[in-house]
Amino acid sequence: MDDSGLLATTTVTPTATRPLLGQTILVVEDSCYACDAIRLMCLHSGARIRRADCLKSARRHLQIYRPSVILIDMGLPDGCGADLISELAEATPRIGVIMGLSGDDTYENRARAAGADGFLSKPIKSMSYFQKSILERLPEDRRPSGLHAIRDEVIEPDPMAYQDDMAHIADVLTGPNDHHTLGYAAQFLQGVAREAGDNPLAEAARKLAWSRANGAPFTVHAAQVAGMVQSRLEQREAI
């Protein structure tokens, strides 16, 4: 089922205040906090949003629905977003806008090489940046004529979404502490902690990632990260 086609049967004329009206955006993102920011931007921009939290979920979704825009995080629990980007870039019919998404800008070249139309750097807090990044890449027949992003407000996600992310990664860390698990946890926490302004946790996750990448002992760093995550869950307050 094509979401875009369904929307086209209703009155979906974009406006200056809702320039993405008529678009359905699938966000493939494992962070609740990052996704909540995008959800709010879609809400204010007029776009519908669907979410998948991993590659498997995204592929299952795409068997039924075809969004007009897809945003794919590069670091997902079951693989790299570049794999899905490559699949979709070669598919027919092609989704109108395919974009990579990451808090690590070094992934931009990989996303574009896989066939992405563009790349969004997290944290995404500027409404103007979000709207313009998508509007500039929409096909001509789906691009609002004479419209442009005008809202330059800053969006702040729900702090409870950050708590959800802490609960998620706490569950991950209770499993086997193998290289894959710790690598995913370090990458995830670096991104979401930086977005939330939790610099101590972001730095601890960075040290864990560096230790793993350079073959250095990482047991102490892994224990520190796990302890900090648990501390944030116990506090149950916005960071």
Image (cartoon, rainbow, N blue to C red):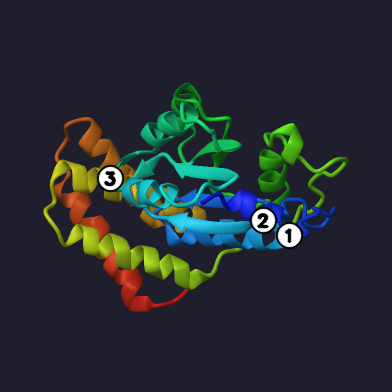
Q: Earlier in the sequence, mark 1 or mark 3?
A: 1
Q: Is residue 24 left or right of residue 86?
A: right
The quadrant holding residue 136 is top right
Locate residue 55, reporting x and y percent. Answer: 35, 45
The amino acid sitting under disc 3 is Asp
Secondary structure under badge 1? loop
Locate residue 48, reporting x and y percent. Answer: 62, 59
| Closer-to-camera residue (184/94) | 94
Residue designated by label 3: 78
| Closer-to-camera residue (35/93) | 93
Q: Nearer the viewer, mark 3 or mark 2?
A: 2
Q: Earlier in the sequence, mark 3 or mark 2?
A: 2
Q: Quick check: 9 above or below 88?
A: below
Residue at the (14%, 40%) spot, across then down: 217
Q: CA distance from mark 3 to mark 2?
A: 31 Å
Q: Nearer the viewer, mark 1 or mark 3?
A: 1
The amino acid sitting under disc 2 is Leu
Check residue 7 in the rendering and tell me which mark sits there, or answer none.
2
Mark 3 packing: few (<14 Cα in 10 Å), some, or many (20+)?
Answer: few
Q: CA distance from mark 1 to mark 3?
A: 37 Å
Residue at the (57%, 40%) spot, across then down: 120
Locate residue 127, reporting x and y percent. Answer: 70, 52
Residue at the (71%, 56%) spot, across then down: 9
Q: Residue furthest right?
A: 146
- Is residue 228 something that shows in the picture? no
| Closer-to-camera residue (228/65) | 65
The amino acid sitting under disc 1 is Thr
Check residue 10 in the rendering and tell me which mark sits there, or answer none.
1
The quadrant holding residue 74 is top left
Secondary structure under badge 2? helix
